[in-house]
Amino acid sequence: MAGKQRILVIDDEPQITRVLRTSLSSSGYEVRTAEDGYAGLRMAREWRPDLVITDVSMPNMDGVELSGQLRSESQVPIIVLSVKGDEKTKVAALDAGADDYVTKPIGMNELLARVRRNLTRAEAIEDTSRQTIEIGHFCIDSDANRVMVKGRELRLTPKEFELLTYLARRAGRVVTHRVLLSAIWGPNAVEQPEHLRVLVGQLRKKIESEDTPHYIITEPWVGYRLEPSGEISFP
């Protein structure tokens, strides 16, 4: 097993854990499973996985509480599984510290793509103290308030610059509306999503070269994520 990346799958449905174990193992990962949040938390502490996949709705400790507990202890990437239409719980898990989500029924190609992306992101986490972010097509100089995209310099307002920098430091990760509103305007703005929609629209006009967004991707009812290389689809 030496050299294999470790993935912990936490779900109370045995059929799902069997399918995920088989697919992930055949893709070259070392996989362990747990049947609920308490067992998953214990295993995460003992085994130290490289990535965690957890269901949102589970008895005892659910995926929201688990995500918050894991995030308070480590920076391990967390992907949550949720049923279609359960946006409220999904968003709560992302606000608690989860990095990404996949909607059931699970599309295995999409899940594997999200696993690869989150593992890659975890290996290249930006040091938040760095003043220059070079990632994908972007070069962001915080000292000079300067942004280059594919070698082209952009003129951004202070709020546009702040939003882009915040997303760039979390590239590939889903960031919820609530988190972005609080980060850019403060905690009193979390109930004013129209501010964020307007700011994202303004920023997109300056960084996107086409009508279809390739960099700032909307996660419906959830938030936004930055794909710094313009990669928006899954195989």
Image (cartoon, grey):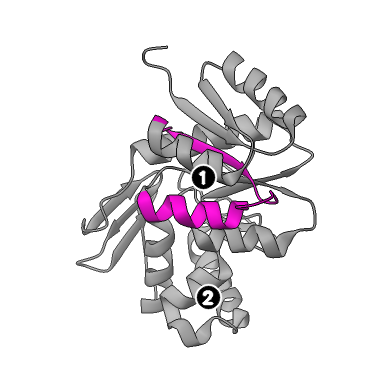
Badge 2: residue crowd in 10 Å (few <14, some 14–19, many ≥20):
some
Q: Which residue is mark 1?
A: 78
Task: Inspect this view and state whether residue 208 appears.
Answer: yes
Q: Quadrant of the N terminus?
A: top left
Q: Amino acid at mark 1?
A: Ile
Q: Quadrant of the C terminus?
A: top right
* Residue range (magenta): 47-73
Mark 1 secondary-structure assignment: strand
Q: Nearer the viewer, residue 174 or 92?
A: 92
Mark 2 secondary-structure assignment: helix
Q: Nearer the viewer, residue 137 or 24?
A: 24
Give the answer, above or below, for where 191 lies relative to 52: below
* Residue depicted at x 51% and y 29%: 7
Q: x, y percentage for residue 208?
A: 54, 57
* Residue depicted at x 64% and y 39%: 233
User: Of discs 1 and 2, which sits in the foreground?
Assistant: 1
Give the answer, above or below, for where 194 lies relative to 4: below
* Residue depicted at x 58% and y 50%: 214
Q: x, y percentage for residue 170?
A: 42, 54
Question: Which residue in the rendered view is the most extreme toward the bottom?
Answer: 188
Left or right: where 192 falls relative to 183: right
Q: Which residue is mark 2?
A: 199
Task: Inspect this view and state whether residue 170 appears.
Answer: no
Q: x, y percentage for residue 178?
A: 55, 72
Q: Nearer the viewer, residue 152 or 70?
A: 70
Left or right: where 225 falls relative to 21: left
* C-alpha separation, residue under disc 1 versus residue under disc 2: 28 Å
